[in-house]
Image (cartoon, coloured by chain):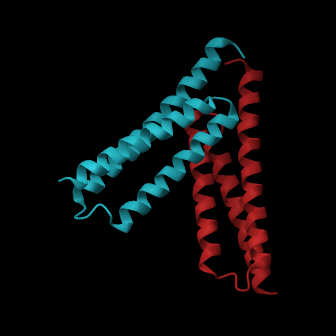
Chain colours: A red, B cyan
Amino acid sequence: MSVEIKIGKREKAYELLQADAQKILKLIGVQMDNLTMPQCPLYEEVLDTQMFGLSREIDFAVRLGVVRADEGKELLSSLERQVSALHEASTRK
Amino acid sequence: MSVEIKIGKREKAYELLQADAQKILKLIGVQMDNLTMPQCPLYEEVLDTQMFGLSREIDFAVRLGVVRADEGKELLSSLERQVSALHEASTRK
């Protein structure tokens, strides 16, 4: 596969996954602003569902060979870190 | 993108999604064999979760440009048809 094409597909795949991760972060942020208590089951359910969806996208991208496994793992754990930071900040309010 | 490479990536993406669809069908089949009553909430939950996961993979593949939207839609509806046929067969047992 010529280098430019490979990078094109890789870059696009990675950008799509990063954009999806940002959407989840924004969704969780909005949820937290509107929630009286962040332990609310709905919040957990939305978060779990979205994280599951993103992890399936990442797994697919890795199996397709357009994203490296370590890149995918880092994307997910960085999102998890950001979400728990958001969560902590909201419980300190 | 040279034709062979494009087809290579497209074919691989489609094959991965088809294989994932077959895994869900098999999983649901096994569930049904072991379930006393197919209306059991666990069965519905497993099915919903797996279908949601596959739909996110398909959506990602379409946005990445490695699977056409109509192909993705057909893959999902064909799986839905097969699952409901399985479901009907198990309720007639």
Query: Going 76% across and 28% down the picture, which residue do you hit?
Result: A8
Q: Position of residue A24 (x, y in %)?
A: 72, 60
- Tell me if residue B56 comes above or below residue A29 in the rendering: above
Q: Position of residue B4 (x, y in %)?
A: 61, 13
Query: Going 55% across and 37% down the picture, which residue do you hit?
Result: B73
Residue at the extreme top of the image, as rendered: B3
Residue B36 or residue B22, whichever sits in front: B36
Query: Going 69% across and 81% down the picture, which residue do you hit?
Result: A38
Quadrant (top left, top right, bottom left, bottom right) of the N terminus of chain B: top right
Tell me if residue A61 can be seen: yes
Query: Going 45% across and 41% down the picture, which residue do you hit?
Result: B20
Tell me if residue A85 can be seen: no
Please give the count of numbered marks on the rendered protein: 0
Q: Position of residue A71 (x, y in %)?
A: 68, 46
Residue at the extreme left of the image, as rendered: B93
- Tell me if residue B19 comes above or below residue B43 in the rendering: above
Q: Position of residue A59 (x, y in %)?
A: 57, 45
Left or right of residue B2, residue B35 in this image: left
- Tell me if residue B64 comes above or below residue A35 in the rendering: above
